[in-house]
Image (cartoon, grey):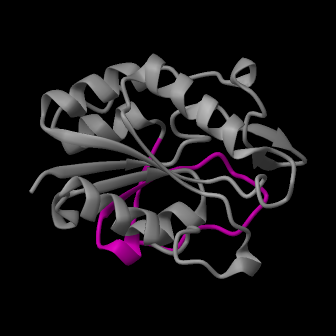
Amino acid sequence: MKKGAFLDRDGVVNRSLLVEGVPTPPSSVADVEIHDGVVEAIQKLKAHNFVPVVVTNQPDVARGNSTMAEIVLINKHIGQVTGIEHFYTCIHEDSDRCACRKPAPGLIYQASKELDLDLSYSFMVGDRWRDVAASQAAGCSTFFIDYSYSEPRPMQPFTKVSSLLEATKIVLGEFDGNT
């Protein structure tokens, strides 16, 4: 089995757009801005036999504010820029009570099964309480990027980091405190 690096998309890989303190996804490829250090982090992860996997909630599809085709285009663009090959997307709202919408761990379980990933050696990086809760439920190590959003705080345990690159360096034993 391989090791997984589960990544939330908006806020971890690319910038979220803030609307009244609440993060929202880019609405088109033109709005996508990859965070500094993401490409380097993905290269390092792959070099150390981690499989980077984006697990993302995109409820704007269910709400009629976006289409699955647009989500696929954004994911494809992000993959081309960063080298991430695997994207797992939930398009439901909380009211749908699906197993794939974070904080449920369904996307992580699905990726783990399909990509032969050992969750006990895997980790997740997220920027919202939902990411942290999904990772914890799946039994992964968890890293949290705290942007102080206007929403509930995640429950411990997690390691607070400033970026995907910092989390990657911690996992790989390269962190020197100056990242």
Out of 55 and 169, give the one closest to the viewer. Answer: 55
Which residue is pictured at 67% across the width and 53% down the height?
58
In magenta stretch: residue 137: yes
Residue 158: image location, x then y, percent: 40, 63
Q: Classify residue 84 as left or right of residue 49.
A: right
Q: Which residue is depicted at the point 44% across and 63% down?
A: 107
- Residue drawn at x 53%, y 69% as measured from the top left: 100
Residue extending furthest toward the front: 69
**Res. 37 in view:** no
Can residue 142 be spotted in the picture? yes
Left or right position of 6 against 145: left
Q: In which quadrant of the rendered view does residue 128 lie?
A: bottom right
Q: Single out the residue that lies furthest toward the right.
A: 20
Q: Nearer the viewer, residue 134 or 63?
A: 63
Magenta region includes residue 162: no
Q: Residue at x 73, y 69 (%)?
A: 93
Screen quadrant of the C terminus: top left
Q: Is residue 136 shown above or below 114?
A: below
Of 81 and 173, nearer the camera is 81
- Expressed as whole percent of the image width and height from the top left, the position of residue 132 reads 48, 64
- The answer to whether residue 130 is above or below residue 161 is below
In the rendered image, residue 147, in percent from the top left (x then y), is placed at: 65, 45
> Residue 1 versus residue 124: which sits nearer the camera?
1
Return the x and y of residue 123 as percentages of the image width and height.
Answer: 30, 55
Query: Position of 74 compared to 86: left or right?
Result: right
Highlighted range, magenta: 136-161
Whether 122 is drawn above or below 76: the answer is below
